[in-house]
Amino acid sequence: MKKIVFWRKWLRSLHRDFGYFIVGLTFIYAISGLAVNHLEDWDPNFRQVDDVQTIDPQPYRQALLEGGTASLARVALSELGAVGPIDDIYQVDESHYDITLQNVLIYVDLERNELRREGQHPRILLRLANWLHLNRGKKAWTIIADGYAVLLLFIAFSGLFILKSKRRFFNRKNLLVAAGFSVPILYVWLSGGP
């Protein structure tokens, strides 16, 4: 009897410590999993931007006279509070200019006094979590992800034996485990399977 008590104490200790250890990874995988499960509803890696604002054309015309299209682009970026290197500036005609940044296009329309920004901004933390979760060509991360999976298996398995059950088969623990196993089985069966 003493061996079983010692064994359960040791198992509880490992279950607790490994559980604490994998909390951070669990948050990353769970949040990223929720995000990538809904790809058809939204882009979890980027936030789409499409906004228009009215501008005073005078500073833009002055910038063109003093420094050309590069000066005009700096005025537009300043007005939008945008940063980043300019990839390209294209003059459509005397009143229309297209400014290309890494993930954003800026349209300057001096005829209609409009400044339009279209593009996407990365969702930094979620994008990083998705990058890790989807394991894009990272051999070292594969080792970490496999270790995490092994620890999850240990947590699940050890959780079955931490507490002593009074009834052998029809106890709460076994019923909940059976219900958990039945979810994917029923889904595959009801959906027609692969």
Image (tube, rainbow, N blue to C red):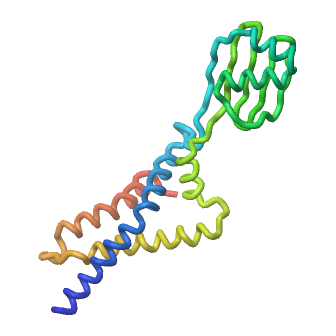
Residue 168 shown left or right of residue 135 in the figure = left
Q: Quadrant of residue 162?
A: bottom left
Q: Quadrant of residue 50?
A: top right
Q: In the rendering, at what x and y percent does residue 128 appear?
A: 57, 52
Q: In the rendering, at what x and y percent does residue 86 appear?
A: 78, 33
Please determine whether, in this image, residue 77 is positioned above or below residue 53. Answer: below
Quadrant containing the N terminus is bottom left
Residue 136 shown left or right of residue 101 in the figure = left
Residue 36 shown left or right of residue 171 in the figure = right
Q: Nearer the viewer, residue 80 or 182?
A: 80
Q: Quadrant of residue 177?
A: bottom left
Q: Nearer the viewer, residue 82 or 20?
A: 82
Q: Nearer the viewer, residue 192 or 107?
A: 107
Please determine whether, in this image, residue 24 is positioned above or below residue 72. Answer: below
- Identify the residue shown where x is 80% and y is 19%: 97
Q: In the rendering, at what x and y percent does residue 34 appear?
A: 46, 48
Please determine whether, in this image, residue 129 is positioned above or below residue 159. Answer: above
Q: Nearer the viewer, residue 170 or 54?
A: 54
- Identify the residue shown where x is 28% and y is 66%: 178
- Identify the residue shown where x is 46% and y is 62%: 25
